[in-house]
Image (cartoon, rainbow, N blue to C red):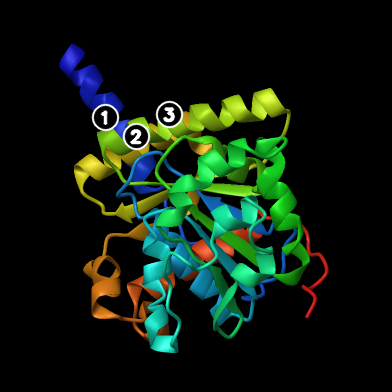
């Protein structure tokens, strides 16, 4: 009897997961400008595809004519490396202005911005961003500092996309406070699920302590339809249906290897990555609010 009950519960969870992921299309097939434009990718666990997703979503927005600023707030600088800056004759080293210099008032924000392509700018990261928390502790009201900084460029872009380190620290808290949409990428395994719960708890604590509310959404990454993945997806959907995005990024060796192979997946006519990120971009648009004025410049 117990075995049948467990089996029935598992089947219900599996069925719910299998039919949850659906493509999201805009009725007019266009990406419109939206109200919530500051988007951060946050997760206390590494290896969930946070950086890759931030990169490809930014590039997808650029493809459809949006002006995007990408901020690399991770001292590892993997997002910065993904742009292959030497190919456009840009050298990034310890003297390059980064976010920690902006916070320390050593550099005006606009001086740290690198133009990497039409409609796409970057504030890079180096090992100097390992000082971010220390620098942030030295400013008044550190939790509000990133919102102050981003207010200086908010009107210049359709979207500002921020990639953070896999940690729960002061700078990430300040970035979460400044973000209008926080996306939590997860893979379908137990360690990722635990990291998700820990990150959600931290965000809810921040929202309570500082009395603010932003959109928080879970993105299923490296998705496949094997039974174990569907089971974990079912568990996440069952407890957090209102937070899970309906679009998902399927597992792909092309995505995994795109940096080493220097492949532009979004320019390919037949690309699973292009389809998945198009659907993700559509869904992000649908939940980021009403149209507002275009960016200046």
Instruction: Find residue 215 and report its horizontal and vertical position in percent.
Output: 63, 43
- Point 57% across, 60% down: residue: 161
- Point 40% across, 56% down: residue: 127
Could you tell whether 78 is left or right of 191 in the image?
right
Looking at the image, tell me whether mark 2 or mark 1 is earlier in sequence order. Answer: 1
Per the model, the C-alpha gap separating discs 3 and 2 is 9 Å
Quadrant of the drawing holding the C terminus: bottom right
The residue wearing badge 2 is 193
Instruction: Find residue 186 and report its horizontal and vertical position in percent.
Output: 37, 45
The residue wearing badge 1 is 10
Identify the image quadrant of residue 30.
Answer: bottom right
Give the number of the disc on residue 173.
Answer: none
Q: Is residue 94 above or below residue 1?
A: below
Q: Is residue 128 above or below residue 96?
A: above
Between 113 and 215, the one nearer to me in the picture? 113
Instruction: Find residue 121 and report its horizontal and vertical position in percent.
Output: 58, 74
Q: Please state which of the two labelled residues, at mark 1 or mark 3, is closer to the viewer.
A: 3
Q: Residues within 10 Å of mark 3 (few under 14, many from 20)?
A: some
Could you tell whether 133 is left or right of 195 in the image?
right
Assign a secondary structure to mark 3.
helix
The residue wearing badge 3 is 198
Quadrant of the drawing holding the N terminus: top left
């Amino acid at each position: 009897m117990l075995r049948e009950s467990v089996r029935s519960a598992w089947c219900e969870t599996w069925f719910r997961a299998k039919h949850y992921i659906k493509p999201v299309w805009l009725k007019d097939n266009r990406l419109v400008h939206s109200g919530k434009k500051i988007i951060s990718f946050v997760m206390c666990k590494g290896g969930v595809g946070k950086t890759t997703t931030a990169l490809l979503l930014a590039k997808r927005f650029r493809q459809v004519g949006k002006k995007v600023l990408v901020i690399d707030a991770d001292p590892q600088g993997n997002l910065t490396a993904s742009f292959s800056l030497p190919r456009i004759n840009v050298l990034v080293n310890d003297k390059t202005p980064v976010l920690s210099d902006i916070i320390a008032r050593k550099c005006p924000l606009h001086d740290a911005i690198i133009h990497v392509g039409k409609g796409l700018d970057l504030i890079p990261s180096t090992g100097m961003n390992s000082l971010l928390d220390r620098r942030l502790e030295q400013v008044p009201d550190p939790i509000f500092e990133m919102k102050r900084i981003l207010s200086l460029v908010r009107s210049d872009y359709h979207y500002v996309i921020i990639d953070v380190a896999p940690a729960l620290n002061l700078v990430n808290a300040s970035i979460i406070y400044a973000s209008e949409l926080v996306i939590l990428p997860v893979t379908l395994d137990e360690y990722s699920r635990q990291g998700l719960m820990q990150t959600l708890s931290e965000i809810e604590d921040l929202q309570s302590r500082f009395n603010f509310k932003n959109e928080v959404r879970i993105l299923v990454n490296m998705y496949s339809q094997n039974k174990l993945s569907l089971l974990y997806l079912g568990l996440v959907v069952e407890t957090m249906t209102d937070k899970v995005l309906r679009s998902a990024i399927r597992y792909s060796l092309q995505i995994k290897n795109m940096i080493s192979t220097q492949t532009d997946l979004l320019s390919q006519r037949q690309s699973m990555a292009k389809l998945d990120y198009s659907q993700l971009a559509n869904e992000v648009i649908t939940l980021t609010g009403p149209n507002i004025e275009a960016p200046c410049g």
